Amino acid sequence: MSSPAITLIAGGVGGAKAAEGLAYSDYREGLKIIGNIGDDQRFHGLWVSPDIDTLTYTLADAIDREQGWGLKGDSNRVLSQLQQLGCDTWMHLGDLDFATHIYRSVQRQAGVRASDIARAVARGYGVDIPILLPTDDKVPTQLDTELGWLDFQNYFVAERCIPKIKQVCYHNAHLAKPTPEALEAIANAEIIVIAPSNPLLSIGAILAIPRIRSALENCTAPVLAISPLIGGQAVKGPAAKMMQEMDLRADSLGIAQYYEGLIDLLIIDEQDQHLKPAIEKLGTAVICTPTLMTERPSRVEVMSHIVERACDAFKLTYKNNRACA
């Protein structure tokens, strides 16, 4: 069966789960992924791109599944030695993981496009599904907290998401240029899926890139989002906490309100079915279905079911005029 052209917009562990679910499903063939680069930061003189690496390692089946990030079987000898030398080592980087960051940093210093570097890293890990960057520019996510302004990793890792936040800023996003690959993936998509990622961090950083949001608003494909909240709680990460601190509803209705005007359909977990009428009042269609994705089989099952339900809801056909099924 031919596969529809699906563009997944993804960040964090939730995005990697959705990516893996589609990558190992019948819908792999037409899949492209736009990943978050707002979490990127420099450590030990090296440029680290956590969300892009997590996507790459997950699709390569090289991810440390217990942690949800990093490489399986990795060691920490370099980090231990750096600590002994007096370096600040709160950002966990494994020995094998360092190779990725060294390669990326050397290539960036040589003037190679960030998109080309990401493509080369993916190829090195045997990943043939396109992992696209929304921009080749640096757009670091920064948070205004009770401790002052913090870079994302300082907030997320060093401070363990504890400080209350007042504002999220995607630094220099207004100056960034979208990559032609990302715009093309949106324009040519037959289905666009926003992964169950943190909307303020992972997805917000992508939408902040000029022309990315407008491309989504004006595309011909239906845009659907999967709520990262179940029963008002995030499966993993600080999404619910952050939304509360920024005076947003910390539930699937709050997710619908955040994406209002951008999405056509919101996928919510069955536990949140009582929110369906309120979401529909916003003009957003709703599908209630199990959304928890644990191991690979459940990720494939959930994502396949979501694509099938979306195709049915929008009466979609694709390329060879066969309906999604």
Image: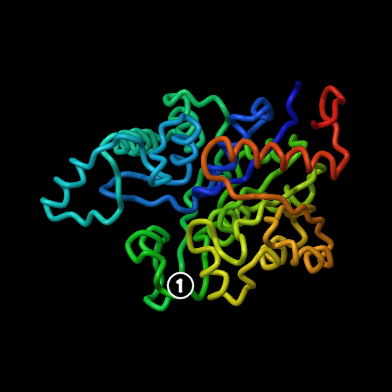
* Residue drawn 78% across the image and 63% down it: 276
Q: Position of residue 138 (x, y in %)?
A: 47, 50
| Closest to the observer, 54 or 152 | 54
Element at label 1 = strand
| Closest to the observer, 58 or 178 | 58
**Coloring applied to the structure:** rainbow
Assign the C terminus to one quadrant of the image: top right
Q: Position of residue 129 (x, y in %)?
A: 57, 28
Assign the N terminus to one quadrant of the image: top right
| Closest to the observer, 88 or 24 | 24
* Residue drawn 13% across the image and 55% down it: 86
| Closest to the observer, 199 or 87 | 199
Q: Is residue 178 above or below residue 6?
A: below
Q: Position of residue 142 (x, y in %)?
A: 46, 63
Q: Amino acid at mark 1?
A: Asp
Most extreme residue toward the left, as rendered?
84
What is the number of callouts on the image? 1
* Residue drawn 73% across the image and 39% down it: 307
Q: Is residue 183 above or below residue 226?
A: above
Query: Is 3 left, or right, of 246 in this rendering?
Result: right
Query: Is 33 left, or right, of 149 in this rendering?
Result: right
Q: Position of residue 269 (x, y in %)?
A: 67, 55
Q: Which residue is mark 1?
A: 144
Callout 1 crowding tier (Cα within 10 Å): few <14, some 14–19, many ≥20: some
* Residue drawn 49% across the image and 53% down it: 38
